[in-house]
Image (cartoon, rainbow, N blue to C red):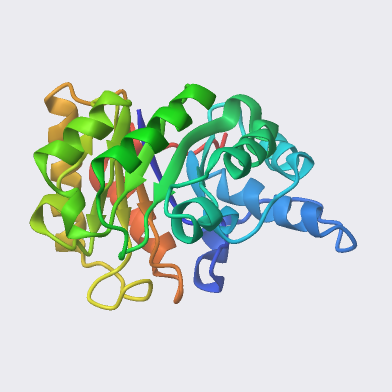
Amino acid sequence: MWRIGTAGWSIPRAWQNAFSYPVEADASSPDRAAASHLERYARRFSAVEINSSLYRHHRRATYARWAAAVPSDFRFAVKLPRTITHDQSLVGFDAPLDVFLEEVTGLGDRLGPLLVQLPPSLVFHHDAASEFFAGVRAAFDGAVVCEPRHTTWFNDDADALVTRYRVARVLADPACVSRALVAGGSSALVYARLHGSPDMYRSTYSRAFLETIAQTLIATQSNERPAETWCIFDNTTLGAATGNALDLQSIIGPEADQSNAP
């Protein structure tokens, strides 16, 4: 299963025609207006990454409304709150994790992986990481993916630890070390996050780069590695993510065409 999408479902003006779909939006209801954009987005992509959950809570009812706006085979990846990953550095996480998990249950069976994005300053400490992922696994049995951004996380010990807790390690670009360009951890999931390069969050990727990434992701499936392969474009600041995601779909071919259009 291929899942290609972007961080958030905003549709840049340049791509509005590619997502045209008549949806009645009630301007008096922000949630409904947001859902209308999501419905159009979900006609072309089968997955989206919710990054806003890093910064603020969303009500369970809001998640449920989003889930109701997409087809049954659509999935949401949701980023853990920065309270857990950044402010508390994976320590004392029980209470905020419980709150977060109660909220995202609103997505029901449309909930995909939980994304644990770590701050670039967070050094790998075996015991602290083990306690954290054990706690996550005690509370949640679904897919979990981690994006570490400190070089100390890219070694055999760290990879063995996340594998033990059935956590996939992100394939990321730009990469802090060469090993970050290779998916690691759990073999059940490959999850690529492409942030834009050389200017993170802004630069668009060339066709040549996308073809290389496509071959990398195809190779992981040829090796019978993942049950699912995700590729999320996070270069959203200038709207590059949408075009890159559509281009990657076209490169990979029919298997990646997750359009729900009739």
Query: Measured from the top left, where is residue 86 in percent x and y?
Result: 45, 59
State whether residue 255 appears in this view: yes
Identified at 51% across, 65% down, the residue is 15
Query: Would you say residue 22 is visible in this rendering?
Result: no
Give the residue at x 43% y 61%.
Answer: 242
Between 107 and 144, the one lying in front of the other is 144
Q: Residue 7's x, y, as percent?
A: 47, 56
The foreground one among 24 and 34 is 34
Q: Quadrant of residue 74?
A: top right
Q: Position of residue 29 (x, y in %)?
A: 86, 57
**Point 81% across, 52% down: residue:** 24
- The residue shown at (27%, 59%) is 149
**Position of 202 compared to 138: left or right?**
left
> Would residue 215 appear left or right of 102 to someone viewing this image?
left
Picture quarter with the N terminus: top left
x, y (%) of residue 168?
A: 29, 35
Q: Is residue 101 above or below residue 172?
A: above
Quadrant in which the C terminus is drawn:
top right
Residue 64, placed above or below residue 151 = above
**153 or 143: nearer the viewer:** 153
> Which of the 4 quarters of the picture holds residue 134?
top left
Give the side of residue 160 with respect to residue 254, left or right. Answer: left
**Label total for image:** 0
Horizontal relation, residue 186 to residue 156: left or right: right
